[in-house]
């Protein structure tokens, strides 16, 4: 499916026409449109992570092309790097520190030149992977977590939320140690498997290297501390995905109307 769901050179939100084209591409396959869009996001994120070193190694070349008049989006499509990440590489090549880059991108109108500001804003509009503002993504993830908590509350299951664990571990250890979204107080079994904790993932569980390694590392900490748990994926998961110590679940039994409305 990876070849079907990606559009070369596109790191932003798809247009209605592109979404329609994607729907036609996947029609013969047993996969939904939301799953494909989420898979596309994971593929773009993986591309951004694994190409970062290569991109930074070419930052001086990218800066020269930019200073000779080539735009960030044109460079992004030419070299297949996410626009905002590419713009950061250009600023790094100028000798800017990480702090200066961070502050400048937070207040581009005040801290960037007229051209840089326009290029950055255009880059952000076409980048859902490395853009500065991830607020909407966090809101949807938190809403999905709330829905999961509502489900277990209605079932009469007692649990502790991540916020409680964060505060407790911060006080005891000075930093978070192991903080799943839900830590079960009552004995819970799902499909015959005892579950001590649950983590909510507001995306499709793709069997890709980067998200798989990230999830396995996170789950490993939970298993060492609390035992076997479960990961609930908003858009289901690939049958080939295996995560030791965790039962993988999709969100089908949950009432997702609140998330859809949001």
Image: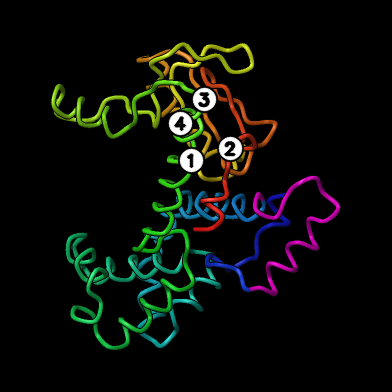
The residue beneath circle 2 is 254
Reply above or below: 230 against 130. Answer: above
Residue at image coords 42%, 17%: 223
Reply above or below: 228 against 99. Answer: above
Crowd class of label 1 (few under 14; some 14 to 19; many from 20; radius 10 Å): some
Q: Secondary structure at mark 1?
A: helix
Looking at this view, is 256 or 9 the one in front?
256
The residue beneath circle 1 is 147
Cβ atoms under marks 1 and 2 closer than 8 Å: yes
Crowd class of label 3 (few under 14; some 14 to 19; many from 20; radius 10 Å): few
Distance of label 2 from label 4 (alpha carbons): 14 Å
Q: Position of residue 227 (x, y in %)?
A: 43, 13
Q: Which mark is residue 155?
A: 3
Earlier-in-chain disc, 3 versus 1:
1
Reply above or below: 219 against 87. Answer: above
Crowd class of label 2 (few under 14; some 14 to 19; many from 20; radius 10 Å): some
């Amino acid at each position: 499916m990876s070849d079907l769901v990606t559009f070369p050179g596109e790191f932003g939100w798809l247009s209605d026409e592109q979404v329609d084209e994607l729907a036609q591409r996947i029609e013969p396959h047993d996969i939904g449109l939301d799953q494909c869009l989420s898979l596309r996001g994971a593929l773009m994120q993986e591309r951004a992570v694994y190409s970062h070193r290569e991109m930074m190694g070419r930052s001086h070349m990218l800066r020269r092309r930019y200073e000779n008049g080539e735009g960030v989006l044109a460079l992004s499509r030419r070299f297949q790097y996410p626009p905002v990440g590419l713009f950061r590489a250009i600023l790094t090549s100028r000798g800017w520190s990480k702090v200066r880059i961070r502050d400048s991108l937070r207040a581009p109108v005040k801290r960037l030149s007229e051209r840089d500001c326009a290029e950055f804003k255009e880059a952000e509009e076409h980048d859902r992977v490395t853009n500065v503002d991830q607020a909407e993504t966090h809101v949807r993830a938190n809403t999905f977590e709330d829905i999961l908590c509502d489900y277990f509350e209605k079932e009469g299951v007692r649990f502790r939320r991540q916020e409680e664990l964060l505060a407790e571990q911060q006080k005891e250890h000075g930093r978070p140690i192991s903080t799943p979204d839900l830590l079960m107080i009552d004995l819970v079994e799902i499909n015959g498997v005892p579950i001590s904790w649950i983590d909510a993932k507001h995306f499709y569980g793709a069997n890709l290297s980067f998200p798989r390694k990230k999830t396995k590392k996170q789950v490993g900490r939970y298993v060492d501390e609390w035992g076997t748990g479960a990961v609930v994926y908003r858009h289901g998961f690939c049958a080939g995905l295996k995560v030791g110590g965790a039962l993988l679940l999709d969100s089908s039994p949950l009432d997702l109307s609140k998330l859809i409305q949001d």
